[in-house]
Amino acid sequence: MKGLLSRLLGQPWVGSFLAAGLVWLLAVVFAGGHGGGEILSSALAFATFTVIVGLGQMMVITTGPGNVDLSIPATMTLSGVIAMKLMDTESALILVGIAAAMGASFLVGVANYGLIRLLRIPPIIATLSSSFLVLSTAISIGRGLRIKPPAPLADFATARAFGVPFAAIAVAALAAIIGLTLKHTIYGRTVAAIGQNERAAWLAGLDVRRTRFATYVLSAMLAGLCGVLQSGFSGGSALNMGDDFLLASIAVVVIGGTSVAGGRGNVPGIWGAALFMYLLVTMLNIFGASPGVRLVMTGLIIIAVIAVAGSENPRRA
Amino acid sequence: MRKTVFGIVSVGLLVAASAAVADTKDKKIALSNNYAGNSWRQAMLKSWDKVTKPAVASGIVAAADAYTTSENQVTEQAAQIQNLILQGYNAIVVNAASPDALNGVIKQACDAGITVVSFDGIVTEPCAWRVAVDFKKMGRVEVDYLTKKMPAGGNLLEIRGLAGVFVDDAIHSGIEDGVKANPQYKIVGSVHGNWAQEVAQKEVAGILPSLPEIKAVVTQGGDGYGAAQAFAAAGRPTPLIVMGNRQDELQWWKEQKDKNGYETMSVSIAPGVSTLAFWVAQMILDGKQVPKDLTVPFLQIDQADLEKSLATTEKGGVANVEYTADDAAKVVAGASK
């Protein structure tokens, strides 16, 4: 029993859940002991979006140092704009809209990897510059207009049973699939292997290029999925709907216990970290703290997590 | 009789227009814009096009080109304005990324003999003109409306804008003053909605469970619909939410009104303020005396105007007005008094 407990506590993702629980407790205490259930329910609803993009970002970061996808916010926006525009509030067109949005996201992923591979541009610059193109496309398609989602999509995105959002359950299943993929498939193992040592992975005969290609495409498509879902949830797409997700997508990966240096991904931690980030903001709002304090806290926490996680495992320096 | 009046007015307009043609037909005006990534800015650029294209076609000015930087960055906009100076524009209309960080390059433009008119995001450099919105008053107007609507007072939730932007501070201080003068209101919670429905929805949903009953929500625009959704999702009674002229907000207001007689107000700045700045620049180039500080009225929609405003607002857009040369002359005359 004790062995099991200590093994559990040794998991890198446990910390994020403990931290989430702690800030939740503080928030509820400060709020006078009520509203705990509601706070948790909305934390689940909003963490869902961060988890979707976090999963893609986690896979990209796991492929090794320098790999990051900064085009996530722009891809979300493009996908949301395309989906809402094609659906045009018609329920019959939901699948068409989703298909087109996912197709566009797929192309963004292809373009990102194309820039990285063919033009040999570092991922951080490639994905940042492609996001300008992607956002400009979204602007020219949507012209900044906010089109409402069809009712069934909005209903699905906002539906809850006993306080648990349906979308959260679906995304928990998605996270489980990605977790299993990472641990038990050739593709997943290759991602980790590349992240640990790209050259060794290549010498071992692994298909480095195709794996990285698939990873950038996966990240873009998850961002696209998030864009569609968020548009359904918030009553339409907006050009700035992705703004919140650039820092968030990276933060949940890092806080969740994924190695920033690559080679070691962690799926459950993304959920813990996304809940923690939302609850932290909620707690600071309830305290009446200014947004300055909020940003400082977020920054300090990320630095602290990286410092702790970095010193924990000297074997992989 | 009516026809005669109309005739006189149109002759007057023609005279005014032809007078303008005489003096600014060779002048080139540029719009320097620092951001295009939301519906308000998109509407602002569209209004600019809608008003300046006919102005160029009819020879009032030679050019009225719009330039937008890709990122909301001071350095990028400074470089852009330097280019505009070199390209020989006679006037630069600027929506600035910062009230003071662009002052150096604005001064360079003035020294090169270029008329600089800032609007919305105004600059403090004294050589430039400012077409400013009294954001503080906008915040105050919201509380004043509440004193009429619910004089008994109650708990308020405040949704603020993007932290660190002066507009956010100005609207907030107006609201604060209003609440100070009317102590029956109490701000029991405050979140930053960043003028985005998604963010407002998220932040309100987070703080709501910890709050007592909310009577009204004071906002900054682009956040009212998100707040309404958060209240609905939490299963709480819908308070009076001040709206910000976005079409989805007006639509939601209309639905509530039809259902249960819901009453509120909506206030924001018309994106067409860019066209007012255009006409002000044209007047200055025309040699007219224009005071350096001008104030634009904000666009307020009351219960009685709701249907009319909704009908004229593009689906998914922002309630807007474009200004004419006459409107600009009136604003200038008002400020010269």
Image (cartoon, rainbow, N blue to C red):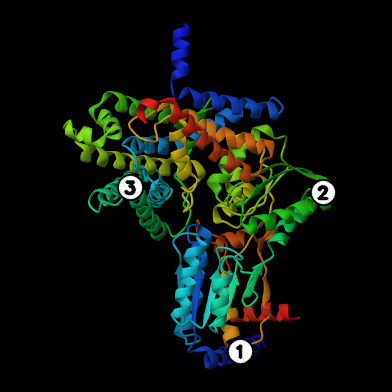
Amino acid carrying label 3: it is Pro
- What element does badge 3 sit on? helix
Image location (x, y in percent) of residue A257? 43, 29
Name the residue: 78% across, 50% down: B179
Question: In this rendering, is residue B119 above or below A86?
Answer: below
- What element does badge 2 sit on? loop
- Which quarter of the image is occupied by the N terminus of chain B? bottom right
B336 relative to A181 in the view: left or right: right
- What element does badge 1 sit on? loop
Residue tagged 3:
A123
Residue B199 appears in the picture as rendered: yes
Task: Tell me the crowding category of disc 1: few under 14, some 14 to 19, or many 20 or more residues within 10 angstroms, Cα based.
Answer: few
C-alpha span from label 3 to label 2: 58 Å
Image location (x, y in percent) of residue A17? 51, 25
Amino acid carrying label 2: it is Pro
Residue A46 appears in the picture as rendered: no
Subunit ID for the residue under disc 2: B
Could you say which disc has been placed on residue B287 in the image?
Answer: 1
Subunit ID for the residue under disc 3: A
Q: Is the Cβ of the residue at disc 1 closer than 8 Å to that at disc 2? A: no
Q: Is the Cβ of the residue at disc 1 closer than 8 Å to that at disc 3? A: no
Task: Tell me the crowding category of disc 3: few under 14, some 14 to 19, or many 20 or more residues within 10 angstroms, Cα based.
Answer: many
Q: Which of these two is toward me, B288 or B52?
A: B288
Residue tagged 2:
B151
Q: Earlier in the sequence, mark 1 or mark 2?
A: 2
Q: How many marks?
A: 3
